[in-house]
Amino acid sequence: MKDSIEALIELQSIDDEIRGFLLTREELAVNQKRLAEILGRMNAELDEKRAKLDEAQRFYNERQDDLKHDGERLTKAKTKMAGVTRTKEYAAMQREMDNLRRKYSEDETELKRLNAAIDEYKTSIAGQEEKLAELKAEVKKEEATSGDRLAELNREIDAIESRKTNVNGRLDDQLLRRYSRVLTRREGKAVVVAVGGKCSGCSMRLPPQLFILVQRAETLQACPNCQRFLFFVAAPEEA
Ligand SMILES: [Zn+2]
């Protein structure tokens, strides 16, 4: 029975170690996923901005064509006016010319404003592109590091699994099944120390008779409350 107790204690410590490794592995995966999500979001944002820029640029080009067209009309009107001699017609044309000139000047100002806005937008996109490139480089570096760490973790897990197989061989199947059951039900802790007459797993005070049996370690004992296997460690002698 003593060997069973020792084997159970060892098994518990192996399972604790494995849990630590698995947790680290999970953290690595979570971190990778988070970075990929950030990258994806930034890419989508940039695509949206680029599409908006294209649209603004198209609008600007159209308006510039309009302006060019208006400029041509203005030149034509000037030529035509030079040939007009009748006062009434001349006045009407003068009004039309004034309107054209005003519209042309307004449109020109608006286009300049639009062009400035487009330039500003382009700068903002370029800044964001730069940030994205930086982040991508960082992610790549991080991926290489976590790849190495992952391989190392897998090696460590393999090694510990083979140690576990050895320990399992020292326990009979029924006991192993019981251990697994308690491990699952009790947050990964199936073997705990009994200290000061209490189960350290659930803090329940053990019946004195049971505590004595645990201290003797001749039989395998479990906490009546949480069913965890109990073992005893003699307190170090006080100096
Ligand atoms: Zn307990």
Image (cartoon, helix red, strand yellow):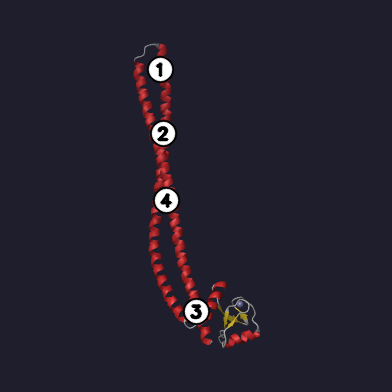
Return the disc, 3 or 2, that comes first in the chain's sequence.
3
The percent position of residue 71, horizontal first and vertical second, equals: 37, 26
Whole-percent x and y of residue 20? Answer: 48, 71
**Cβ atoms under marks 3 and 2 closer than 8 Å:** no
Residue type at mark 1 is Met
Residue 168 percent across, percent down from the top left: 48, 80
Q: Is residue 180 above or below residue 49?
A: below
Residue depicted at 47% across the width and 62% down the height:
30
- Using the rendered view, name the quadrant where residue 119 is placed: top left
- Disc 4: which residue: 43
Asked if residue 141 lies left or right of residue 224, the reply is left
3D distance between C-alphas at marks 4 and 3:
48 Å
Is tag 4's residue or tag 3's residue first in the polypeptide sequence? 3
Q: Dividing the image into four equal quarters, which quarter contains ligand 1?
A: bottom right
The mark closer to the camera, 2 or 4, is 4
Q: Residues within 10 Å of mark 2 (few under 14, many from 20)?
A: some
Q: Please tell me the numbered disc located at residue 93.
A: 1
Q: Earlier in the sequence, mark 1 or mark 4?
A: 4
Determine the CA span between mark 1 and mark 4: 55 Å
Dot 4: element: helix
Residue 33, relative to residue 61: is it above or below? below
User: Which sits earlier in the primary sequence, circle 1 or circle 3?
Assistant: 3
Residue beneath label 3, please? 11
Sequence-wise, the earlier of marks 1 and 2 is 1
Frontmost of labels 1 and 3 is: 3
Q: Is residue 120 visible?
A: no
